[in-house]
Image: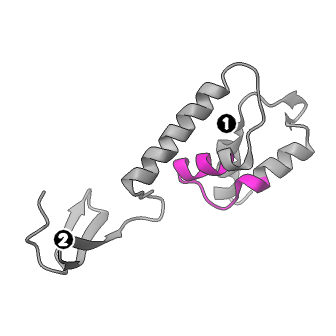
Amino acid sequence: MDLTNDKADSSIVINDDITVIILGREENQIRIGIEAPDDTSIWRGELYRKIEDTAKSIALKNRGRFTPPTCDEVDLYIIKKGYSGFTGEQFCSFYESKGWMVGSNKMKSWRAAVTTWAIKVRNGC
């Protein structure tokens, strides 16, 4: 879709709930705004690719035996999944204090634990 000839305040609607609005143009640049539901993740392409590449390298590094993640790894995963309401530092501090135990069992997947944590935060637990 070519937006180069559209006027300011023109818009494109995607799936009934995402709107891309042309805010203005300056020489060879078009300024846009995006309206989307709060649970929709919107990323600049190069940042999203960096997150994906980092996630892939982390996954390759962590094959086999459980290795506790860094706070930055957890933050990247939280961002990638679109979770909110907690940070990687909070997650890591909590499980570090528990010896990376889930109940009486050693943690096997920190990603699964982050997902469970996000569900509990979302449900107000």
Q: Which residue corresponds to the image point at 61% horizontal and 59% vertical from the top-left?
A: 84
Give the magenta part as a residue range. Answer: 74-90
Q: Residues within 10 Å of mark 1 (few under 14, many from 20)?
A: few
Q: Amino acid at mark 2?
A: Asn
The relative height of residue 38 versus residue 43 in the rendered view (above or below) is below
Q: Earlier in the sequence, mark 1 or mark 2?
A: 2
Q: Nearer the viewer, residue 1 or 50?
A: 50
Q: The C terminus lies in which quarter of the figure? A: bottom right
In the rendered structure, which amino acid carries the disc numbered 1? Ala
- Which residue is painted at 39% across and 57% down in the image? 44
* 10 Å crowding of disc 2: few (<14), some (14-19), many (20+): few
Residue matched to label 2: 28
**Residue 93 counted in the magenta span:** no
At numbered mark 2, what does the secondary structure look like: helix, strand or loop? loop
27 and 57: which is toward the camera: 27
Q: Which residue is mark 1?
A: 112
Q: Residue at x 22, y 72 (%)?
A: 30
Pick out the residue farthest to the left. 5
Main SS of residues in magenta? helix
Q: What distance separates the C-alpha of mark 1 from that of mark 2?
A: 45 Å
Q: x, y (%) of residue 38?
A: 47, 65
Query: Which residue does the image show at 66% across and 22% down from the upper left?
Result: 63
